[in-house]
Image (cartoon, rainbow, N blue to C red):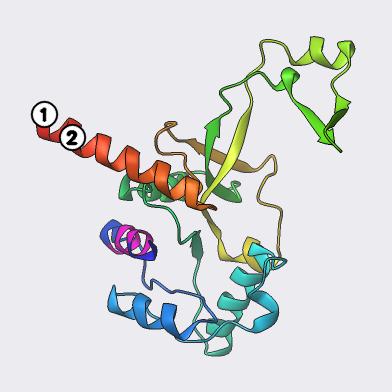
Amino acid sequence: VISYAISTALKSKIFDKVIVSTDSKKIKKLAEKYGADVPFIRPTILSNSKAITLDVIKHGLNFFLKNKIKFNFCCCIYPATPFLKEKHLLKAFNILNKKEKINYVFAASEIDYSVDRMFQIKKNYIYEIFNKKQKKKLINKKFFRDIGQFYFGKSKNFLEKKDILNNNSIPIIFKKTEAIDINTLDDWKFSELIKKAKTLKRLKR
């Protein structure tokens, strides 16, 4: 699945380097096969489920700074993003170039259900739910979510670990069929179905 992300980054032709950060020799070999560079092995402390994305990016940028290589911009592309396209990255890069005060551009999608109907469950029972006052404020409002595709920004902001989701960030809205964050086998199976459907649609044309 990482081949999609690498291929998209290379096809966009906006990057001086396409780097894969990993602690795995297997992924290193695969990444290099598909055209990416793997100039360092990511430390174990940054390679577990508790690792923070901003720390991983900062580690990569610091590697190059130590080697006297400085980048003005940096884009973190998640490895499981088969629906990310070059046009998304180009749009993000153009926004960053035109709007000086923008820290980051990232991928988002509209939540297609009413937020006021959400609740949490504890021991099979509802234990937290919006009250009437909260629901009244939420009705008819649109909400969006970060879909974990990419984060594009100025390198200095990543190095300073500025929050990505802030008032100086701009989201690019993805279609629902593009907004799939693959974390589970079910996500992958669903992605395969969408890919097949899109292929059939193209063939019918």
Classify 171 as above or below 135: below
Estimate the x, y position of residue 136 in percent, counting from the top left.
80, 9
Q: Examine the rendering and report whether any part of residue 91 can be seen.
A: no
Q: Is residue 134 magenta?
A: no
- Going 56% across and 60% down the picture, which residue do you hit? 154
Q: Residues within 10 Å of mark 2 (few under 14, many from 20)?
A: few
Quadrant where the C terminus sits is: top left
Which quadrant would residue 49 be assigned to in this image? bottom right
Q: Which residue is found at the position 36% from the left and 71% from the top?
A: 16
Q: In the image, is residue 167 above or below residue 57?
A: above
Residue found at x 38% / y 48%: 84
Please, what secondary structure does the residue beneath circle 1 have? helix
Q: Which mark is residue 31?
A: none
Q: CA distance from mark 1 to mark 2?
A: 6 Å
Q: Please give the count of numbered marks on the rendered protein.
A: 2
From the image, which quarter does the N terminus lie in?
A: bottom left
Q: Pointer 1 and pointer 2: residues touching (CB < 8 Å)? A: yes
Q: Position of residue 68 (x, y in %)?
A: 52, 87
User: In the image, what residue occupies the spot 55% across and 81% down?
Assistant: 23
Secondary-structure class at tag 2: helix
The residue carrying mark 1 is: 204
- Which amino acid, by three-letter code, is at mark 2? Leu
Dominant secondary structure (helix, strand or loop) of the stretch shown in magenta: helix
Q: What range is drawn magenta here?
A: 4-10
Q: Residue furthest front?
A: 124
Residue 111 in the image, given as x and y percentages of width and height: 58, 27
Residue on which disc 2 sits: 200
Of the pair 118 and 157, the residue shown nearer to us:
118
Q: Can residue 5 be seen from the camera position used here?
A: yes
